[in-house]
Amino acid sequence: MKPSRSYIDSLSDFAELLGTIGQAEKAAKELNRELDAATTSAPVAPKTQTAVSEPAQTPKPEPDEAPPPTTEELLAELDALVGLDAIKDSVRSLINLVKVRRLREEAGLPVPPMSLHMVFTGNPGTGKTTVARIMGGLFRAIGVLSKGHLVETDRGGLVAGYVGQTAVKTGELVRSALGGILFIDEAYALTPPEAQNDFGREAVETLLKLMEDNRNELVVIVAGYNEPMEDFISSNPGLQSRFNRYFAFPDYNAGELLAIFAGMCEKHEYALSEYARKSAETLLADMYAARGENFGNARDVRNLFENVISVHADRVSGIEAPTREELRSVSAEDIEKAAAM
């Protein structure tokens, strides 16, 4: 049978299609060869790295803190203070009492109740804050307090301006002092006699409660002038029962004031000439003789020292290329000019 024309045409189309497919495959193979050659000869682009945050750095440990001072070191620091012989004896006696009390407790022996809260009386600049700081360290060293730090405040740190806020403010301050000593300067300002409804009385009541609640974790020292402090303690029966240990800080005499001034100079490497020392001695003796009720003691000496180094700086700044000795040397004229400031 002879194939029809349509059949022959379909075979022709199919053959043409196969030829087209073959050409396409050949073209694809050729393209792949060209791509492989290009990839081999072309420089390889660096791979794009996904940004990754650096791992958190482990904090470097702080250098080891110096060990807290020992009882012996703290007592040596106390002894190095100018004057205050009676205060030093009282502090040593109290530390001995506390140490023996703890030994009796460890031995199972009865111990009478004892309050460590104290009243420091005296004029400004008589060393009250310094002694309080040393006592905090001593109480820590003998195991009475866990930290022994000193938190200083006054009426402003305890009393707020609105009803209900004073108790909160006082509570926060007491919590910051737990394990150490809370030192309240000019404590009598909390109970002004002319203002019976003053918020300061709320601070006192809150303080007394917190002292009782934390009696094994807190020592409170109230400080100020002699007579006002007596009035303050007698203003509240709770204060009288808790504050029964008094330390009276006397004014420094003229010789002690000179020793304090010379110590400040030595600490900061200022050298007193012979005439400068005599000038300072005369000035401080006159200052002591003319002192009033509110004599500033070491605070006044500090002010004198700061005036002296200011006058010294004015003088030395006028010297071209001053020597080390000139940078250190304080003259009698420096003292005299400072006294007039």
Image: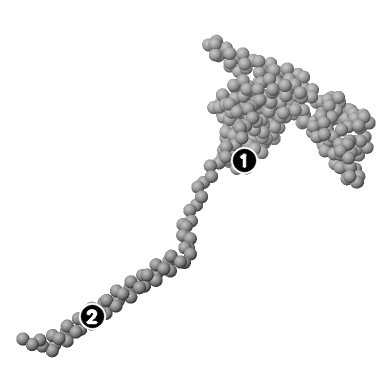
Q: Nearer the viewer, mark 1 or mark 2?
A: 2
Q: Residue at x 86, y 38 (%)?
A: 324
SS type, badge 2: helix
Q: Nearer the viewer, residue 210 or 271?
A: 271
SS type, badge 1: loop
Whether the residues at callouts 1 and 2 have beta carbons within 8 Å, the answer is no
Q: Callout 2: 10 Å neighbours few (<14), some, many (20+)?
A: few
Instruction: Tell me where residue 98 appears, x and y as whole percent.
Output: 62, 17
Residue found farthest to the left:
1
In the rendered image, the quadrant that contains the C terminus is: top right
Q: Residue at x 77, y 31 (%)?
A: 124
**Residue 114 in which image quadrant:** top right
Identified by mark 2, the residue type is Leu
Colour convention of the picture: one colour
Q: Residue at x 61, y 32 (%)?
A: 64
Q: Callout 1: 10 Å neighbours few (<14), some, many (20+)?
A: some
Instruction: Tell me where residue 266 appears, x and y as whole percent.
Output: 82, 31
Q: Earlier in the sequence, mark 1 or mark 2?
A: 2
Identified by mark 1, the residue type is Ala
Q: Residue at x 61, y 13 (%)?
A: 100
**Residue 298 in which image quadrant:** top right
Q: Is residue 233 visible?
A: no
Disc assigned to residue 160: 1
Please say if 244 is above or below 196: above
Disc assigned to residue 238: none
**Residue 111 in which image quadrant:** top right
Which residue is tagged 2?
A: 17
